[in-house]
Amino acid sequence: MRVVIDYDLCESNAICMQIAPDVFEVRDDDFLYVLNETPGEDRRASLDEAVQRCPKQAIRVED
């Protein structure tokens, strides 16, 4: 699977980072960074939660 961010929508509010800190990081510059664009299937539940809880719906997971 692959994590895709729509940076035009993303507000870098770090909800995804709280859910999956091994995949997402908001740095001191207040921008979201994807630390692992192709996480293992064992991360599916956390990524699905991050997708659902993103207030701007800026995250998607592609298979």
Image: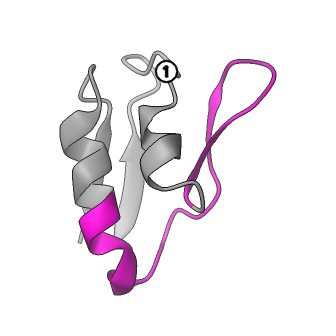
* Amino acid type for the residue under numbered disc 1: Asn
Q: Quadrant of residue 1?
A: bottom left
x 32%, y 40%: residue: 59
Residue 6 on the magenta span:
no
Q: Position of residue 62 (x, y in %)?
A: 25, 62
Q: Is residue 47 left or right of residue 36?
A: left
x 42%, y 17%: residue: 8
Q: Quadrant of the C terminus?
A: bottom left
x 29%, y 31%: residue: 54
Out of 19 and 1, give the one closest to the viewer: 19
Q: Is residue 43 left or right of residue 25?
A: left
Q: Is 24 above or below relative to 45?
A: above
Badge 1 is on which residue? 13
Residue closest to the far right: 28
**Colour scheme in the image?**
one colour
Chain part drawn in magenta: 23-46
Q: Position of residue 11 (x, y in %)?
A: 46, 15
